[in-house]
Amino acid sequence: MKSELSGGWPAVARDLLAALARGELSSVELTERCLAAIDARDGDVRAFLHVDRESALLQAQQADALRARGESPGPLAGVPVAIKDVICEAGQPATCASRMLSNFRPPYDAHVITKLKAAGAVLLGRTNMDEFAMGSSCENSAFQATRNPWDLTRTPGGSSGGSAAAVAAAMVPLSLGSDTGGSIRQPASFCGVVGMKPTYGAVSRYGLIAYASSLDQIGPFATDVEGAARLLEAISGHDPRDSTSVRRDVPAYSRTFDQPLEGLRIGVVREHFGEGLDADVASAVQAALKVYEGLGATLVDVALPHQQSCVAAYYIIASCEASSNLARYDGVHYGHRAESFDGLVDMYSTSRGEAFGDEVKRRIMLGTFALSSGYYEAYYLKALRVRRLIQQDYQRAFEACDVIVSPASPTPAFALGSLIDDPLAMYLMDIYTIGANLAGIPGISLPCGMTSAALPVGLQLLAPAFEEERLLRAARMYERETNWPRVAPCGA
Amino acid sequence: MNATPIIGLEVHVQLLTRTKIFCGCPNRFNPDQPNTQTCPVCLGLPGALPVLNEEAFRLSLRTALALGCRIAPFTKWDRKQYYYPDLPKGYQISQYDLPFSHDGVVEIGGETEGDVPRRLRIRRAHLEEDAGKNLHDESGRGGDSRVDLNRAGTPLLEIVTEPDLGSAADARAFLEDLRLLLTDLEVSDCNMQEGSLRCDANVNVRLALDDGGTATTPIVEIKNLNTFSGVEAAIEHELARQIAEFQRTGRRFGDPGAEKETRGWSAERNETFAQRGKEEASDYRYFPDPDLAPVTVAAEEVARIQERLCEPPGARRRRFAGEHQLSEYDARVIVSQGRQFADYFEAVARACGDAKQAANFVTQDVLRELNARGLGIREFPLTSDVLGGLLARVAQGGITVKSAREIFGELLAAWSARAEAAEDGADVDVGELPGEAAIERIIAERGLAIVNDEGALEAALAAAIADSPRAVEDFRAGKQQAAGAIIGKVMKQVKGADPKRVRELLLKKLA
Ligand SMILES: [Zn+2]
């Protein structure tokens, strides 16, 4: 064991990159170590749906060879990254944790995969999720329920629960998730890791299997802010294949994240600390605000008047888009097709009926209904109007503050099975995170404490669009002052 | 019973872009190698995203402006959702409530004496993607159906007219002009066999009843008409069928059970037939496609395209009739050959100063040669300058029309001989086209120049009269044709003499 690498190895991307650069560690060793950690712990955690050992070791060998030849090895050279099973990687499964795509292997790489390959990363495996990214607990996976590494009776959150748990259990130092209504930030908070949703348009969605196109965004998980900054830097940037991808230079997050912000104004929304918020979570977040004040930041009361409409608007817009995005899974060209059926229409309905889970069906039906003639104006158009009001709320709030701080989730990780029959309670898990997706702004969740039951609490910071750099610097200011555990006991 | 047809058309035009509308796959008709022009985007694979092909949008703007449409400053893309195996995403990207263009107008007819021109309003033109093609087992053994997605994602312009057309003939005339326009604009090849121009017709009829009231029959949409004659025949048939049906059932537009019906057209049986039952009130659940950004069109860009538009065929025919004094028939023949041909005609007319003569030559001689040689006007070896120069000689009395035809044939024959020699490996320059020098040479060699030397003619005439006492006698006895022998002698003597002038002189002499 290398001396610089503390417990929970492999955990911190910076340390690993440094060790790789110094030649104290090879990518093959690191990758083998990750694979061993998966062998040791994933039987319990169940974060991975698919691990391609051969491919991972081959990529690691290539990274080592490149470094040995003295060629520029790329900013993430040799570091294993786990990928949420919703992002296409040529030749690897991309099931979206659905029976519908259980045999589907895309023939092409998502833009972020191309970027990661260019950065020299080792793509290690595919992580579990709620089916088609619909859910907040990973229990909607058709294949397995991922468990929270801090307490195996609890959920890691969702939908990117597998990617969060894989990092929290120190099976991999970095992973990618996708965030449509909080699917990165909520599991990051449940698992005590850093998770970030970039501005809509900052990271290409090309190759991200769509749930709700106007809300989906790919983002990083890491054990610390620097890891998230490095991974975000590697995957950001314009992609002509995604019309919603923005033409903008990518700031050097990995170089600026450690610079504190002078005179930081922190917006606090009074309603965020009201009914339904767990007492331990509330006090952890209040304590975090005190830390910021101690660093010279000022707290500003800001209002988000339409906050209470976020969840309703989100579930209409997301379900409408999902009902359309998932229409392509009809059993004709790829994906599950029923064994027996009577005619074309029956082939469609039987194939879809067999292969989609309950939550997916619920949202397809909700969206289909809301887009139907006679309901479109009352639901979809009205939800779009609410979305604009919410966007305006954030614009106004950011005139008075630089970042908005809140809990990432109203509760710590809940017990597996406890909400599975109460979709509405499950939907309310997203009340703090959904606004950022509707407004298209970036958000980050980072560990800010432990509950009395030794569960991590996540602190959410939001910033105006394309202010990822500000967000990372503000998050790092807090992180420097605190020392919350970075990996779960099972991974340490 | 007085019947007024009410006809509107929906025309689908495949645009001639290099690549498909939302991906980089080649846009080419290729039914023999199914699913070879595809990629994750047009296959509708999970995670793939569309990106608008700007060329398709530009061609659409050009077409809409030529149809007199207004261009929307802001337009967006909508998903039209339905399930069908040739539609891999489960939705078609189209334009619903904000099409890029709307409210155009074109003129039909008014080109013959007493024919009053009709206005046809264009309701809208919008851009969308074509679907793939389902291929069913036609052996009757019940094999699997297959899907070819080569066509999926071909840019498709849908042009919707108002129901202003009052006859099947007008519907056909509009479509024929539309095809000319689209090919002139180089936005589509309009190959109807390959499906790059497809038409649906909405047809019903307003009847003046014996009791003084009126009745309107239910609307029928005739789908997939893919020939001009088919359009005309299908509408004719459908109008008659609707009148007969009304007389039998009395069912009117808007009655319960009289919803819009979809019918097909069988050219073999010469009748329309019920395609599916009553059209279900299909709900396409249109909504804006979140994967595509709306498009804003700057007024300057519209102006720039407008400036470069070519003259629409109808306007050109009317101008030819006025400016060049052409017959309606000649104008129609020339314009129907396409823009390049009409340009050629105009250049010849300008060069020779006699549009009538130019029209005669291009509609008869040039067209005949093009057809015989399988050439387009752009490959025709006689440039408009050369033909214009040749016909200018006729107009100025330098050669006769007959001589011009002879030279025309000679120039082409010489060019063909050279081309053939080149094919056989001879070292000749086939790039060199017949020119002025060749015309001059043929005139000189064959003595085709009209001789206006009155002294020479007088002398030759005097000699011919002296030489033909019999013919003179017959002529004086009233046999007009006897003059021919004398004129023939003069013509033999003086190459290039104008027979008209010789006859005049002869008549004067013998009077
Ligand atoms: Zn394609």
Image (cartoon, coloured by chain):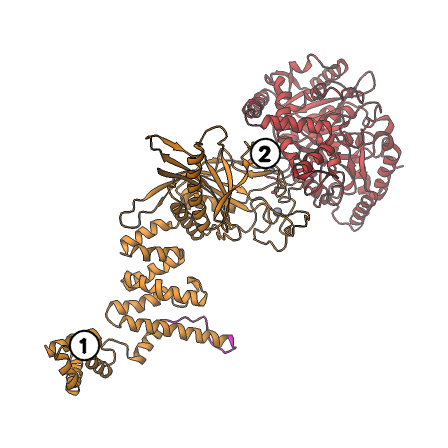
The picture quadrant where one finds residue B457 is bottom left
Asked if residue A6 is positioned above or below residue A75 in the image, the reply reads above
The picture quadrant where one finds residue A294 is top right
Q: Which chain is red?
A: A
User: How busy is the neighbourhood of tag 1: few (under 14 within 10 Å), some, or many (20 plus)?
Assistant: many
Residue B4: image location, x then y, percent: 36, 38
Residues at marks 1 and 2, CA–CA distance in whole angstroms: 84 Å
The picture quadrant where one finds residue B216 is top left
In this view of the protein, which residue sits in the foreground, A256 or A247?
A: A247
Q: Left or right: A365 with respect to B7? A: right
Asked if residue B360 is positioned above or below residue A338 in the image, the reply reads below
In this view of the protein, which residue sits in the foreground, B146 or A276?
A: B146
Asked if residue A59 is positioned above or below residue A399 in the image, the reply reads below
Residue A398: image location, x then y, percent: 59, 22
Nearest-to-viewer mark from 1 and 2: 1
Element on which disc 2 rests? loop
Image hue for chain B: orange
Q: Which residue is mark 2?
A: B290
Q: Which residue is mark 1?
A: B502
Q: Quick one: quadrant of the C terminus of chain A? A: top right
Residue B368: image location, x then y, percent: 39, 66
Which residue is at a point 31% across and 80% down the rendered structure image?
B446
Element on which disc 1 rests? helix
**Is residue A223 in view?**
no
Which residues, given as a range, are shown in magenta? B423-434
Furthest residue in direction bottom, as rendered: B467
**Is residue A221 in view?**
yes
